[in-house]
Amino acid sequence: MVRLSLEELYKEVILDHYRAPRNKGRVDPHDVALERNNPLCGDELELFLRYDGDTLEAVGFEGKGCSISQASASMMTEKIQSLPIKDAITLAESIKRMMAGEEEGDPNELGDLVSLKGVVKYPVRIKCALLSWNTLLEALEESGKLERS
Ligand code: ZN
């Protein structure tokens, strides 16, 4: 009988998103496109957002790099698609706190994203996991959608 450990399960979720990325591709038309990379690992990401008022109407990405960076982008786009912008910002902040080891991460809130927690113990990979989230926050800021509290 095969029983997956939590760590193996996390790995499976990441590989699944890496092999079959969700929302891969440009979004046209888009309101903002932002390209960022993680030179430490060679990860590249371009994020496309289209707004409908205060909602993320369409989200997509192009990119290449390690499984963690690309899976994180895939999971992020899946999760924030159609979400109010303020909820996407709350989510990004939760992920950043989880990756900083400041909180456990709530599976009910985060879904598949909780699998990124397995990366916390590999400090060099944390930047890979956060590339998409930092790009999202920067893109929102660039289009005047990020309200600093
Ligand atoms: Zn990477």
Image: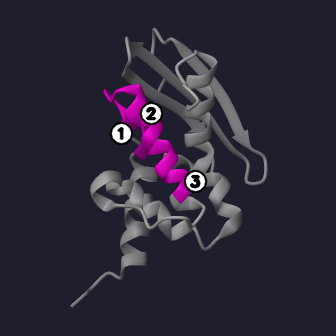
| Amino acid carrying mark 3 in the image | Ala
Q: Secondary structure beneath disc 2? A: loop
Residue 56 point in image, percent of width and height: 38, 23
In the rendered structure, which disc, 1 or 2, sits on the residue that comes first in sequence? 2
Quarter of the picture containing the N terminus is bottom left
- Mark 1 = which residue? 78
Judged by depth in the image, the label closer to the viewer, 3 or 2, is 3
Residues at marks 1 and 3 touching, judged by CB atoms closer than 8 Å: no
Q: Which residue is rendered at x = 65% and y = 61% of the image?
A: 125
* Residue 84 picture quarter: top left
Magenta span: predominant SS is helix
Residue 33 point in image, percent of width and height: 58, 19
- Mark 2 = which residue? 24
Label 3 within 8 A of ligand 1 by Cβ: no
Given residues 21 and 127, the one toward you in this image is 127
Given residues 56 and 42, the one toward you in this image is 56
- Residue 129 numbered mark, or none: 3
Magenta stretch: includes residue 93: yes
| Amino acid carrying mark 1 in the image | Glu
Residues at marks 1 and 2 touching, judged by CB atoms closer than 8 Å: no
Q: Which residue lies furthest to the bottom in this view?
A: 1
